[in-house]
Image (spheres, rainbow, N blue to C red):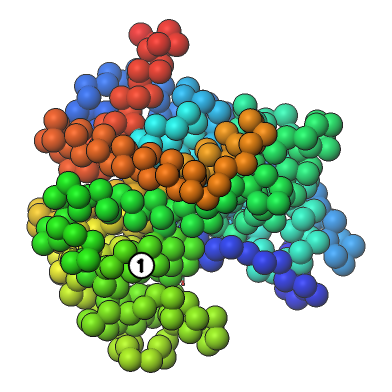
Amino acid sequence: MIKKKMKKKATISKEGLPSADVSAESQFDRAANILKVDDDLKNLMKVPKRIIQLEFPVRMDDGKLTMFKGYRVQHSNIRGPYKGGLRYHPDVSMNDVKALAFWMTWKCAVVNIPFGGAKGGVVCDPKKLSSGELQRITRRFTKELSENIGPDIDIPAPDVNTNAQVMAWVLDTYSVHHNRSAYAVVTGKPVELGGSVGRASATGRGGFFVLQEAIATGHVKGVSDIKEATIAVQGFGNVGSYFALNAYDAGAKIVAISQVEGGIYNPAGLNPHEVLDHIKKKGTILGFKGATSITNEQLLLCKCNILVPAAMENQIRGRIARKIKAKTVLELANGPTTPKAHQILLSRGIFLIPDILANAGGVTVSYFEWVQNLNHDIWTEEEVDTKLHRRMKDAYNDVAKAARDYKVDMRTAAYIVAIARVAEAIKLRGIYP
Ligand code: NAD
């Protein structure tokens, strides 16, 4: 068993478990049917290419040997090396990892970066592990995976409960095992070890660029300029906070923000910089001066033009979807809307920008990090930002065009764009037909 009390707690980047949304497969099927993909090709695109399951021993601080279970699912490398995060969580399951790997394939394809999809995980609770134990788990897991990952094979990255430090351990273990310096084996590393500037803020900033483009192309009802936007943000972690800061700095009004413990609301607008300071000082978002306390449900239903779920999966369910006042939903979390809620939002004419497009800024800057590493190059923040902006803008317009051409919603359109790209690569390789 994992020890309950440890001398030194490891730092973790994320909390909770945004588990894989099995609806990914139904989303895929809907788009594949519209594209008239036949069953053989559909099957070829759905099934993961390689599934790795490991049991490995780690010496704990008390001297006992504990067995850990680890997974790596390599879904597709048709468009480039497998790419996807490593998740450490007590509830990680093979099914989750499979679905998340599947999702990564379509996310990378929708933003047109030359990666396939993968995901990994170790069943453990980092909150109960010392930093030394976490490092030993990471090193042993990496060693076991060493022949299956690599700069042109499979490139892990941080996910729930893993961070830049964990990636640095993966990099070091891989480099020692293969006797070579290989920065490009992981992304999301510390900047001092080949990480890219702009990676930490990339998902929130990418989401902001997508929203800007949606406004510029007239898709956001009642908002013709970001300065007219009133926005509610659920989840003020990495993604939500960077998104809110970007939108606020551009002139949008952030009317509500929440965290797991609840939220705050002020129709006159909140300053997210001050909210961050408040959280740093008080350890909670609650009690922010000049704002009313609200629940997470009240946040989802509050008066605003744009609702941004940036916390967890399945937050927008049928009952909530029927009452949402916002006319646009920007999905920054993975799978925040259930399939039923999605249908309700569509029937109510609410414009939804789907997760695989809206939150792809993170993997896009991971791609930039990999390119810099392979070229032994270091880009400036301005270069990263300019390239991210172009990628997100192009991806938005590709999806919006597919939505027009096929007369479908943006989620189905995003899958159509992604599936068409993967299918074309399969055809050009001569794998099918
Ligand atoms: P994080 O852990 O930094 O922040 C999560 C935030 O959500 C915190 O403010 C937390 O208090 C809040 N939260 C947790 N449970 C909640 C609940 N039940 N109700 C309301 N709020 C809750 O995580 P993050 O990196 O910001 O990720 C947020 C979402 O974005 C996740 O779905 C993640 O999978 C997705 N995502 C993240 C990235 C990335 O680069 N970090 C990339 C793509 C997608």
Residue closer to the observer: 219 or 73 = 219
Horizontal arrangement in the rendering, residue 57 relative to residue 247 (left or right)? right
Q: Which residue is mark 1?
A: 249
Quadrant of the image for the C terminus?
Answer: top left
Hey, what amino acid is under mark 1?
Asp
**What residue is rendered at 43% in x and 67% in y?**
241
Tell me residue 224's x, y (percent).
14, 58
Q: Is residue 314 above or below residue 115?
A: below
Q: Image quadrant of residue 303?
A: bottom left
How many residues crowd around disc 1 within 10 Å: few (fewer than 14), some, or many (20 or more)? some
Tell me residue 11's x, y (percent).
67, 67
Horizontal arrangement in the rendering, residue 276 relative to residue 91 (left or right)? left
- Identify the residue at the far right of this view: 63
**What residue is rendered at 33% in x and 79% in y?**
270
Residue closer to the observer: 102 or 203 = 203
**What residue is rendered at 40% in x and 67% in y?**
245
Tell me residue 299's x, y (percent).
28, 75
Quadrant where ligand 1 appears: bottom left
